Amino acid sequence: MHQPRPARHRLTALLLAVGHGGVDCYQGMVAALVPVFVLERGYSLPAAGGLVFAASLTSSVVQPLFGLLGDRRPARWIVPVSVLVTGAGIGALGLVGEPWLVFLLVALSGIGIAAFHPAAARLARELSGGDHVQMSWFALGGNIGFAVAPFLVAGTVGALGLAASPLLIMPAAVALIMVLGCLRTHRAATSGTPLTRTAASLAAEDRRSFGRLTVAIMARSIIFVGLGSFIALYAQQDPALGPAGGTGALFVLYLGGAFGTVLGGRLARRWPRTRILRWSYLLTAPAMVGLVLAPGAIRLIFVAVVSFLLYVPFSLHLTLAQDYLPRHVGTASGVTLGLAVSVGGLASPALGVLAEQIGLTGALLSLIIVAGLAWLALRRLPEPQPLTSPLGQGTS
């Protein structure tokens, strides 16, 4: 079991979590900017949707490559530089007129996001010593940043026009201050302390278990992105809820994740992570039935339950992936936080086609099968032995 970290290490981990939120804010900004480009620049819907595709492609698919590079030659300077690149790409969108330059800047920001996550996840693991609660705060920071992005866009570019896009650099500025403070404190804490790279280099890797975990992460992404795409429409079709119910369902879906992420870390202090994952996905199936079939406000309760269950494993996915591939922590982080998560976005159009064929109720019920697939992938997944942290506190 992991020992809680000293107060200074916890503060440093908190700084990194806030920095993570600042970076992930830009993942949510691109979709929020779509209406602005349509109304102010006259972009067609396919062109505006292409902005989201460019951001998703560069920020997710490229992540494992940065993780692989980080495994071969770790470089912490990538963390602050990637923050700058991410913010500059989005902040400059209103300063250029040519569509190809807009797409280039969006892609540049996506590359910054892709570079940040593997390096930051490695640093978060070092700072936390593998403590699951602190890793859950790192994950929560990203979730909060993504959730507040539409409000930041609405308060700046939405109100003042694209000419105000440089104001969108503010989250990156805050994130940069946080990660620089984190790196400075971390450098002082590890000065003169030998890293446990030898232990990591000698540890056996379990690629088969990592592959099964990746299947579960993909399944979770399909369920969550599918719900995020269609739950508002489905809920507002209920006469007892109406249009306000659709907005409320989407809000509850994201709010429940905050509680689930933090609780997942606390549960992992008491029980094996693999057991927590299995129970979470097993319970998701009946909760999905309630979400789809329950009437009125009861449906919103089931939305909260499903969100909670899907987010309990969120940070545990990351630590398990790192423990299965101890010699390739960056690659494991890149696949877990990037490539596997992007599958949900790719599957969402297919879910829409299915909804046209059998109805939205049937399409959402089909996600129960996906939850079952996640449970099957995890059914006999072994609990890996966590490695000792470079900051000196091991595991027992």
Image (cartoon, rainbow, N blue to C red):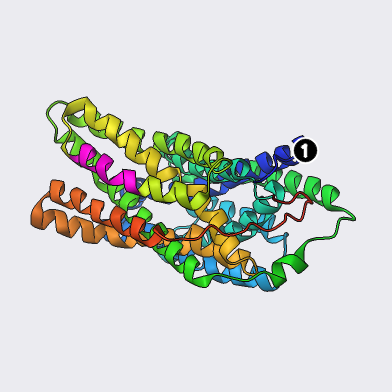
Task: Pinpoint residue 225: horizontal percent, then vertical percent.
Answer: 33, 51
* Dominant SS in magenta: helix
Task: Residue type at mark 1: give it.
Answer: Arg
Residue 224 horizontal side relative to residue 91, left or right: left
Would residue 125 be seen by someone viewing this image from the given angle? yes
The residue at 64%/56% (across/down) is 386
The residue at 20%/56% (across/down) is 352
Task: Pinpoint residue 142: horizontal percent, then vertical percent.
Answer: 53, 45
Above or below, 319 relative to 1 = below
The residue at 68%/61% (across/down) is 78
Residue beneath label 1, please? 8
Task: Pinpoint residue 341: horizontal percent, then vertical percent.
Answer: 42, 58
Residue 201 horizontal side relative to residue 111, left or right: right
Residue 324 horizontal side relative to residue 258, left or right: right
Would residue 73 be seen by someone viewing this image from the given angle? no
Q: Which residue is more in the foreground, 135 or 374?
A: 374
Task: Pinpoint residue 320: horizontal percent, then vertical percent.
Answer: 54, 57
Q: Which residue is more in the foreground, 184 or 85?
A: 184
Q: Which residue is more in the foreground, 389 or 38?
A: 389
Q: Quadrant of residue 16?
A: top right
Q: Residues within 10 Å of mark 1 (few under 14, many from 20)?
A: few
Query: Is residue 184 one of those drawn in magenta?
Result: no
Above or below, 301 relative to 222 = above
Above or below, 206 relative to 49 = below
- Magenta span of residues: 282-292
The residue at 50%/36% (across/down) is 263
